Amino acid sequence: MKKPDALRLKAEEQLAVNGKKISSLRKADLTTLAHELAVHQTELELQNEELRQSRIAAEEARDRYLNIYDFAPMGYVTLDKHSRIIEANLRGCDLLHIGKRNIKNKPFTKFISEDENDKFYVYRQKVLKNDNKQTLSLKMKTADGTLFYAQLDSIKDGAERLRIAFTNISELKKEEEKQKENEERIFQLNESLIRQTQELRVINKELEGYGFTISNNLKAPLRHMQGFSQTLLEDCSNKLETPCLDYLHRIDEAGKLMSLFLDKLLELSSVSMADLNYEEVDLSELVRNKAEKVQQSCPEGRVSFVIQPDLATFGDFKLLKIVLEEMIDNALKFSQNVPHARIEFGVTKFKNGETYFLKDNGVGFDSEHAKNIFTPFGRLHQENVFLGTGIGLAIVQRIIHRHGGEIWAESKIDGGATFYFTLH
């Protein structure tokens, strides 16, 4: 018997029992009773409508939940105590390349790479023993056997069930592997650079030692050559013909130039190997002292200096003195054909901080070749026009680098030159 029929039968039986009571009621009582029945009927109808609306709202909420669940950006599966899939969303089915109807009751391990099954078993036990979410990365496979890397985030559901959210992280894994390869390559390059740097330091030290030794060994025979040529000029000049005297003069001048070269090479070696003794150095005072010597040896008004006062730093006094004197000598050499040479020393601001400069109004040079002037024996002008060894600015750069600084130059032809340098 259907439930509504059973309820009707029960109601009729109840009325049969109370029939006598109803038949004895007065008309007014029956009217009141009818009203009460009508009110109860209306209440029931309202309650039925509320129930209907609640059922519709519940169904809509369920549909929304199912949509959110099915179209979430990650796969969701629920596993029973035997790790069989009892529920899965559409995204999970898409990730595993299988239909939603076909995935139910499939062992989840069917979608895990064979060599990762033990790893998943240990992970499953860990999830069941903890109340917090547990995470694992492992290799999975689709229904058609395509392997991919996945990240699993799982919590237990009851005593033995698991709820798992999983995503495909193959691209992320590729990026991680690529990053590891790059890091390994960078590490190997750094190791190689360290070895090469150490080798270069040893080679440079050996070369500096060789240069120092060779320069010293050459000075003795060079002094002999100069001494004998000078003796011939003094004792035998009246016995020699003009061409022979000219040859002797050339030998003597060449000897002097060679001696200057050797002195500069020895100086380059010594500044490379000398210990640095840091102290406060007044750069303005060093330039002022050099300027006084220059002006004493030059015609009045031939050279003028503009010196910014109180420019001090910390460094090796002797080596920084060499820097400024070499730079001033260089400025004077290339300003020798200017009627009124002007040399300025000061400080300015560059992107790397405080930067000193020494500026002249000499012949200048093409800035495209500026780096060459710091190379030993590097020249931008003809040797017979501007005499020199070509080593002075190399010495300057070596000292600046030993102080942790940099040096560079800006110039244009017939527009003077400005040398900038930093010290740290």
Image (cartoon, helix red, strand yellow):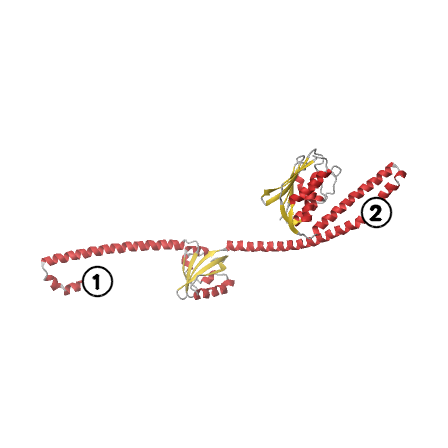
Q: Residue furthest right?
A: 239
Q: Quadrant of the N terminus?
A: bottom left
- Give the alpha-carbon distance from disc 2 to disc 1, as whole Å: 140 Å
Residue 315 position within the rendered picture, expressed as x and y whole percent measured from the top left: 65, 49
The answer to whether residue 373 is visible is no
Q: Residue at x 78, y 45 (%)?
A: 259
In the rendered view, does 188 fall on the left or right side of 270? left
Residue 174 position within the rendered picture, expressed as x and y whole percent measured from the top left: 53, 54
In the rendered view, does 420 fall on the left or right side of 210? left
Residue 202 position within the rendered picture, expressed as x and y whole percent measured from the top left: 70, 54
Q: Which residue is mark 1?
A: 7
The answer to whether residue 266 is visible is yes
Identity of the amino acid at label 1? Answer: Leu
Q: Along the line of sight, which residue is nearer the eye, 104 or 373? A: 373
Question: Quarter of the image holding residue 368?
Answer: top right
In the rendered view, does 70 fall on the left or right side of 174? left
Q: Residues within 10 Å of mark 2 (few under 14, many from 20)?
A: few
Q: Along the line of sight, which residue is nearer the eye, 249 or 295? A: 295
Residue 208 position within the rendered picture, expressed as x and y whole percent measured from the top left: 73, 51
Q: Which residue is mark 2?
A: 224
Q: Secondary structure at mark 1?
A: helix
Q: Secondary structure at mark 2?
A: helix
Say which label, 2 or 1, has the lower sequence index: 1
Name the front one of labels 2 and 1: 2
Identity of the amino acid at label 2? Answer: His
Question: Quarter of the image holding residue 376?
Answer: top right
Q: Residue at x 74, y 47 (%)?
A: 265
Q: Along the line of sight, which residue is nearer the eye, 391 or 15? A: 391
